[in-house]
Image: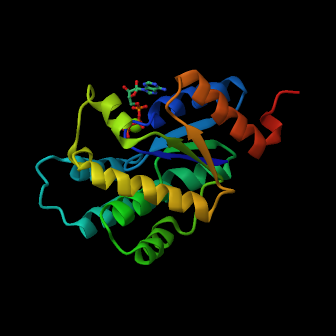
Amino acid sequence: MFVTFEGSDGSGKTTQIQMLENYLLNEGQSVLVTREPGGTKIGERIRKVLLDMAHKQMHARTETILFNAARTQLVEQVIRPALLENIFVLCDRFADSTVAYQGYGRKQNIVELERLIEFATGGLRPDLTVYLDLSPEEGLRRKLADHLNRLDVQGLSFYRRVEAGYHQLIEQDPQRWTVIDASRSRDQIHLDIVRALQQKLPALAPN
Ligand SMILES: Nc1ncnc2c1ncn2[C@@H]1O[C@H](COP(=O)(O)OP(=O)(O)OP(=O)(O)O)[C@@H](O)[C@H]1O
Ligand SMILES: [Mg+2]
């Protein structure tokens, strides 16, 4: 089972992945947690290039290609082998982030991006995508205390386009997505995510 987490910056993806990992381990499942960009030695090096505050000149297409290069490595080196062994894979962001951020946010051609993603992932798609629905303002407020990187410093209109992009993606494929109100407490959000997973995988549901 391949589960990805999407949502605006600071919406609680990393927090909820940790909580879900603990839940699944308690249920006796094998779990692998990974993140984008990164998750492999090559991918983590690409991540450093992407996040570096000194790389102000990076072209939007360079950024897109680097994200997808890291993605290919993650899919082929980590995710596919784990799925073949029936391991639960929880991934912090995946291909939808490219469409939302590089497509809607940076206004690159969505159809071209979809072709690039297909090439990068070899067609691998998540079984379930959790969308943590939180206004960009609230996400940024939560994050202000944390460390900001190059990809965090965009205007609010950029984040509004990203949010609208996510809603388009959800509309196009509602079966794959579960939309969670992320303005609530960590525990309430976690319960909703567990319920969504139990619906996809009845074996997890309590008897
Ligand atoms: N439900 C919640 N209510 C209030 N604060 C929260 C909640 N969940 C997480 N936080 C806090 O908000 C901040 C952002 O959370 P987190 O890092 O999990 O988000 P993220 O989506 O992974 O962010 P990023 O996009 O930067 O990776 C953290 O300081 C975290 O402790
Ligand atoms: Mg995070």
Q: Residue at x 37, y 48 (%)?
A: 38
With respect to residue 69, does 24 lie above or below? above
Total number of numbered labels?
0
- Looking at the picture, how far across and down is residue 166, in whole percent? 48, 56
| Residue for point 24% across, 32% down | 147
Q: Which quadrant would residue 204 be assigned to in this image?
A: top right
Quarter holding residue 68? bottom left
Position above or below: 123 against 135: below
Drawn side of residue 28 relative to residue 181, left or right: right
Residue 73 in sight in this render: no
User: What coloring was used for the rendering?
Assistant: rainbow
Left or right, residue 36 beside residue 24: left
Ligand 1 is located in which of the four quadrants?
top left
Picture coordinates of residue 109, whole percent (x, y): 37, 75
Choose between 18 and 13: the one closer to the eye: 13
Examine the rendering and report whether any part of residue 49 can be seen. Answer: yes
Where in the figure is residue 175, as x and y percent of width and height? 69, 56
Q: Residue at x 15, y 46 (%)?
A: 53
- Picture coordinates of residue 152, whole percent (x, y): 26, 44
Q: Residue furthest right?
A: 207
Quarter the C terminus occupies: top right
